[in-house]
Amino acid sequence: MFFRLLFLLPEFPWSTRDPIQYPDSWGYPGVPVSRVVVALWLGSMAAAEGERKKVIIDTDPGIDDAMAIFVALRSPELQLLGLTTTFGNVHTALATRNALHLLEAVGRTDIPVAEGSHVTIKKAAKLRIASFVHGADGLGNQDFPPPAAKPVDQSAAAFMVEQANLYPGQVTVVALGPLTNLALAIELDPSFPKKIGQIIILGGAYSINGNVNPAAEANIFGDPDAADMVFTCGADILAVGLNVTHQVVLTGSAFCNVTISEAPFLHFDTSPFVTDADREKLEQCDSKYARYLCKIMGIYFDYHKDAYFIKGVYLHDPTTVIAAVNPSLLTCTEGVVRVQTVGITKGLTIFDNTKKRYGEITAWSGMPTVKVAVTVDAPAVVDLMMQRLMTDD
Amino acid sequence: MFFRLLFLLPEFPWSTRDPIQYPDSWGYPGVPVSRVVVALWLGSMAAAEGERKKVIIDTDPGIDDAMAIFVALRSPELQLLGLTTTFGNVHTALATRNALHLLEAVGRTDIPVAEGSHVTIKKAAKLRIASFVHGADGLGNQDFPPPAAKPVDQSAAAFMVEQANLYPGQVTVVALGPLTNLALAIELDPSFPKKIGQIIILGGAYSINGNVNPAAEANIFGDPDAADMVFTCGADILAVGLNVTHQVVLTGSAFCNVTISEAPFLHFDTSPFVTDADREKLEQCDSKYARYLCKIMGIYFDYHKDAYFIKGVYLHDPTTVIAAVNPSLLTCTEGVVRVQTVGITKGLTIFDNTKKRYGEITAWSGMPTVKVAVTVDAPAVVDLMMQRLMTDD
């Protein structure tokens, strides 16, 4: 890939490569910001040359889903093949409505929307909806009019399988909600894990507390059985968990006091974030993306203040899209992830680094490995998102 | 307590106190080694004055149990009220035999042994026994003769309750195996959690992989239901998990290559340990404790080489006893621990730091908090153990 060209730039000192890192051909962790700029410029060139990464976003909009979708639309590195919808922040029907509405709001009705499952892989209908995080409508209680467009006449799973068959090995699914649609795609076509290029999952809490309860992160909690199917399906998977996304904060005040209080042992230093107020910058900017987001994100700030006692919001979904835009902004480790599907820790992701030889066969033994994000260049992620959202097409 | 006297020593620079730390009146984390020496000297003085900490060790010997029991016997800071036995490394009947044998081997048959439960709190009889770690006999396959002494005519739980009533608030139970006996003590006397001074538990894996499987640590896995009862009983509890004990390594060779490979994200630097070969030192020493341990610990080294690819052994049990001898060698955080009792992560301990306000009531909500060890002064723990074992009474 074109990122390999970076090795030809002698004026940039190469950082020591960590032994455990993102092994994708695009990924050079520890890349300094100056090189990120070059990388993005090369990315734009590559995009102009038609080498854009084909992406499907599986989404439950959701305020940070809206941010993520806008970042994807504004990123020349990506070609957005479509949005597929799922339950999570809202019910699936509302997710579909919101996906269509968001595309309409920024004039991108050319992107198809395929509606996903209304129930979990085990047909459970009683689903947790996060109206206290994103509003009853999922988009900050703004009472937007219904969109004119309709979803395509194809399920989310069928759309994913179709695109994977059209472009084998080239499609990236960025999954921002529970993993039901991906599990259905695997059921629909058992060769889907081999045909899909990569699956980037916003899901799990690795070595830290969850956000639904101390054990579970919301997306995995939403359909633990589907998540366990996806994590063990053998596809090329990168999981981006709360341990990473809680480091990426859009600040709400120049004097905000950000502390990553929910990490039981890891205390991330977020001081680089507190010198600027990202929200104010967005509010003072006239792009249609920033204008729209500033309208809806008040409730999301309120939730973070109430739940985490911070004046800022976590950029879960945008970080995950940016993992597709510029993988070098994250480093990861590799191992087996299994999901607990019952009991008080239902929805918990347990990562096995496969380094210990256990005395007995375990539920992790012999399972395919996945990549799990460990570090993130958080200021670069925030900067990249701000750059993309603060300018118009 | 006498450790407060340390504040009167102006020649020692005080380290900055971490906001989350061991709040016990003995505990001053970050104490430099020089002060530890003073503390131990003061500890000996206090012991001479009859202020010894009354301790019951609940144990399943076990090679590192033997080390831990010997450390307790050799520590003037402790008064060993008795040993209670449980299943774990071996079945309970063998644990009782081994406890009696160990006391006999070092001439301390004055210490009573009370036999504990043979089954879990839910009466499960099929128990995992770690013969591949400690040998079929639990003590390195040495075929020791049966002990002459007998256990007292009282169950482990009854013994614990009796001692807690005799010395309310003064007895520390150091639990080195599954927590069945403690759960039975709570069932026997619901006021036991308030009467017992402290419970120090070797149990759990906090933010790292387990040792039975990627989710579970052996002692909690041995009886998850009992463990959940104990962790939520309201007693003053300190849990010492694998995240701490895997930092404390008795080295087996001057050129050993110790890596803490099973930690999924936390890579502990154990380089301080590789300059000396603790095993050789023990072998060259003539104390009865060292002589006995050198006889039995070969299989324990073999297991660590096979399972963790290290030339050294983890000092799980001795570290936990030393947490009673000198609490200042550990720092801890505080929160709620619940145990998963079913499914693939059965035996998993999930710690909630209680810092996030969750949207819903969770299994952790309103539960009593416990302390969980986070850091350990590993070289000081190893040194202290070596000092105690390398000299005779």
Image (cartoon, coloured by chain):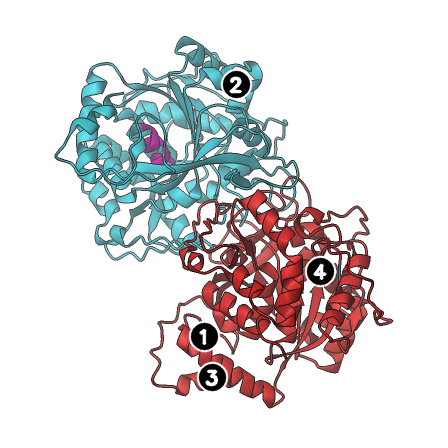
Chain colours: A cyan, B red
Tell me the CA gap for discs 3 and 2: 64 Å
Q: Are marks 3 and 1 on the same chain?
A: yes
Type of the residue with mark 1? Tyr
Q: Earlier in the sequence, mark 3 or mark 1?
A: 3
The structure residue drawn at horizontal position 41% and vertical position 19%, both measured from the top left corner, is A197
Q: Is residue A124 visible?
A: yes
Q: Which residues are magenta?
A: A317-324
**Mark 4–mark 1 contact, CB under 8 Å?**
no
Where residue B304 appears, as percent x and y from the top left, is 57, 48
Compared with B31, A131 (above or below) is above
Q: Which mark is residue B299?
A: none
Compared with B172, A73 (above or below) is above
Q: Chain of mark 4?
A: B
Secondary structure beneath dot 1 equals: loop
Q: Which mark is in front, 4 or 3?
A: 4
Tell me the CA gap for discs 3 and 1: 9 Å
Residue to which mark 1 is pinned: B28
Type of the residue with mark 2? Ala
State the image quarter where residue B213 is shown. top right
Tell me the CA gap for discs 4 and 3: 35 Å
Compared with B294, B306 (above or below) is above
**Does the magenta stretch mainly form a helix, a strand or a loop?**
helix
Where residue A266 appears, as percent x and y from the top left, is 42, 53
Secondary structure beneath dot 2 equals: helix
Residue to which mark 4 is pinned: B61
Residue to which mark 2 is pinned: A185
Where residue A101 appears, as percent x and y from the top left, is 36, 25
Q: Which mark is in front, 3 or 2?
A: 3
